[in-house]
Image (cartoon, helix red, strand yellow):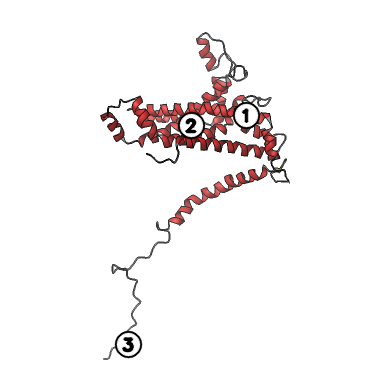
């Protein structure tokens, strides 16, 4: 019996260089790094563009136009809005006041956060407990903390916590917030700000301390360096330079953007007092108050942003940000 025609051979599978058939690559495997990059960062980039960069560009544009009761530019006025806001004594005095406030509150918060981090890093027991205790105020709202400070701690009556302590030492009660002479309200504002911020920056310093190699301390001990001030000055603090730059940068920005604690501590039913007026409160009244002058308000916001940028660049150069280690 004769055999039939032989069947056509099936096409051969692709053969890899090793001789085995190459497996098809998955469509959404880890090799598609660009796809996964945009999947995870795309929503954030989109939100950043829509809610930050577009309003920023629109505010700069609006600062060169006459825009009253509208966010649509109506008439080009050039630098007139900048001349108006810089010629307003209320705005310039608030900028000067907050420059001095920044010079005081930034070093105080920096020193307190670094001291807390050094103390917590040396604790051998209950370290997690102390970290949590100092960090917890960060989770508190500025509004809530300000109301507690205003109505309980520094409320100005005889039975407030601060006046009770003063009475125990035989001192007279103090009107902490209602009397600007002497300006005790700065003590109230400074303490609530320290209480709210110190824990967060302590965590940043703790992370920086954990990155310092122990070999540096061991070598210093072999060379005769005494633990304490000498090791802190020549090893710990220089090794914390990158963390210090980041902390000072964030503190400067937060100081010029202060609003909540000032508004909730000092405002009343009669309005906000003229003293200790933050720039943002001025802009709030200018752009959103009765005048609704969004052009002048945008010009003031640009001036404030430029001031923060100058302070940021100056402190970064002073700390040597980006400078290579010798």
The residue that appears at 62% across and 32% down in the rendered structure is 279
Estimate how packed mark 1 is, as few (under 14), some (14 to 19) or many (20 or more) residues with alpha carbons within 10 Å. Answer: many
* Dot placed on the residue nearer the N-terminal end, 1 or 2: 1
Q: Which residue in the rendered view is the most extreme toward the top?
A: 170
* Dot placed on the residue nearer the N-terminal end, 3 or 1: 3
- Res. 293 image quadrant: top right
* Dot placed on the residue nearer the N-terminal end, 2 or 3: 3
- Res. 151 image quadrant: top right
- Which residue has dot 1 on it? 94
The residue that appears at 56% across and 48% down in the rendered structure is 49
Distance of label 2 from label 3 (alpha carbons): 84 Å
Q: Nearer the viewer, mark 2 or mark 3?
A: 2
Residue 79 vs residue 145: left or right? right
Distance of label 3 from label 1 (alpha carbons): 99 Å
Give the total of numbered labels. Answer: 3
Q: Which residue in the rendered view is the most extreme toward the bottom?
A: 1
| Image spot of residue 204 (x, y percent) | 43, 35
Q: Is residue 170 above or below residue 39?
A: above
- Which residue has dot 2 on it? 138
- Which residue has dot 3 on it? 5
Q: Where's the C terminus, which quadrant?
A: top left
Q: Nearer the viewer, mark 1 or mark 2?
A: 1
Residue 210 vs residue 140: left or right? left
- Res. 29 image quadrant: bottom left
Distance of label 1 from label 2 (alpha carbons): 27 Å
Q: Is residue 262 visible?
A: no
Residue 50 vs residue 72: left or right? left
The residue that appears at 55% across and 37% down in the rendered structure is 310
The residue that appears at 36% across and 30% down in the rendered structure is 234
| Label 2 secondary element | helix
């Amino acid at each position: 019996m004769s055999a039939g025609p032989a069947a056509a051979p099936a096409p051969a599978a692709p053969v890899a260089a090793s001789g085995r058939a190459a497996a098809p690559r998955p469509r959404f495997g880890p090799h598609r790094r660009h796809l996964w990059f945009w999947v995870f960062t795309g929503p954030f980039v989109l939100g950043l563009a829509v809610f930050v960069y577009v309003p920023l560009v629109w505010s700069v544009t609006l600062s060169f136009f006459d825009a009253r009761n509208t966010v649509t530019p109506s008439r080009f006025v050039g630098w007139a809005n900048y001349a108006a806001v810089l010629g307003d004594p209320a705005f310039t005095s608030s900028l000067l006041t907050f420059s001095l406030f920044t010079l005081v509150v930034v070093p105080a918060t920096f020193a307190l956060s670094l001291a807390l981090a050094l103390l917590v890093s040396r604790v051998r027991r209950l370290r997690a407990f102390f970290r949590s205790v100092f960090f917890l105020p960060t989770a508190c709202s500025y509004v809530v903390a300000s109301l507690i400070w205003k109505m309980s701690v520094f409320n100005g009556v005889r039975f407030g916590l601060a006046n009770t302590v003063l009475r125990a030492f035989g001192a007279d009660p103090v009107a902490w917030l209602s009397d600007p002479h002497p300006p005790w309200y700065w003590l109230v504002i400074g303490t609530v700000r320290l209480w709210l911020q110190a824990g967060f920056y302590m965590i940043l310093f703790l992370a920086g301390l954990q990155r310092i190699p122990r070999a540096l301390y061991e070598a210093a001990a072999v060379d005769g360096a005494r633990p304490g001030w000498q090791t802190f000055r020549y090893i710990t603090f220089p090794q914390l330079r990158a963390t210090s730059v980041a902390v000072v940068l964030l503190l400067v920005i937060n100081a010029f953007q202060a609003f909540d604690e000032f508004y909730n501590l000092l405002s009343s039913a009669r309005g906000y007092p003229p003293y200790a007026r933050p720039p943002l409160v001025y802009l709030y009244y200018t752009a959103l108050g009765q005048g609704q002058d969004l052009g002048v308000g945008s010009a003031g916001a640009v001036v404030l942003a430029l001031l923060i940028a100058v302070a940021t660049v100056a402190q970064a150069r002073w700390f040597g940000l980006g400078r290579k280690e010798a």
